Image: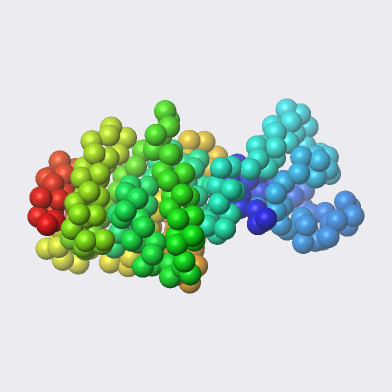
Amino acid sequence: MTYRPTVRGRRLARELRRLRETQGLTLQEVADRLDWSRATVSRLETGQTRPKPGDIADLLDLYGVPSPDRDALINLAREAGQRGWWTAYADVFTGSYVALEDEASRIRAWDTQLIHGLLQTEAYAREVITAGRMLPGPTEIERRIDARKARQKLLDREEAPRLHLVFDECVLHRPIGGPAVMRAQLEALLEFAARPRIEIQILRYDTGAHAGLDGRFTILSFPNPADPDIAYVEGTMGDVYLESAEAIATHGDRFDRVAAAALPPEDSAHLIAEAARSSK
């Protein structure tokens, strides 16, 4: 089963690389001293393999890391190696996004085409999955529906993440699934918008040129300051994760500009309600 690193796994990987570089060692030198392959060390430092506490202990001993830091990092390896609920849907979730989303404390997203997956009704999601994924049959479609329902439980947690979404107005009028499906989806969107931890804005058609013209993206933020934000860009040819400070700053500024150009949440709710009433 392919390992998809969690936020803790990424934090551990960054720390392992920092410790090695502090010691002035190359990947090959570490591999030689532990009788490992260079690829093994590299995969641990890039979060491409599930960390084993024993292996992490060997690395920390080599780097001379004392307790309590040593104990904390070994415990982090245990946490990072735990299998999350999404591993039961490894055939559906092919990237790291869901594992990272599951630990986020704040989610900001701009979308020009669809209602965000966390807020999709079952009927709307079924239409999107059927049309967009070109799956071979109903079994595969239902499998993805079940996975999306499991993912949406994130919003019902006691400590659910803060969600700030900006949609292009066209999302409200694209008749996915027909009038009844769209009306139910828009009514559900209004219910979500009433939750205290969810903020929804609509960017009007007549806004003209704006900072979001390059397409959809999501920014994930995490409760631990040691974990930097991650910008995620989804595409049919693969997903891109941007983690450099410069890339995050650019996407954060872009999101702020789109949100500033969009209607305030209350006015956006009125526009959503109007679209729901006109969906006949």
Task: Give the quarter of the figure containing the N terminus.
Answer: bottom right
Q: Residue furthest front?
A: 138
Identify the residue at image location x=48%, y=35%: 223
Identify the residue at image location x=28%, y=66%: 213
Residue nearest the observer in this picture, 12 or 266: 266
Q: Is residue 247 above or below residue 134?
A: above
Residue 81 location, quadrant: top right
Q: Is residue 271 left or right of residue 143?
A: left
Residue nearest the observer in this picture, 240 or 253: 240
Q: Is residue 36 above or below residue 156?
A: below
Residue 211 location, quadrant: bottom left
Identify the residue at image location x=27%, y=34%: 195
Task: Give the quarter of the figure containing the C terminus.
Answer: bottom left
Identify the residue at image location x=36%, y=67%: 131
Q: Is residue 138 left or right of residue 190?
A: right
Which coloring applies here? rainbow
Q: Is residue 75 above or below residue 117?
A: above
Estimate the x, y position of residue 86 in percent, counting from the top left.
55, 47
Estimate the x, y position of residue 61 in percent, counting from the top left.
83, 40
Estimate the x, y position of residue 85 in percent, counting from the top left.
56, 42
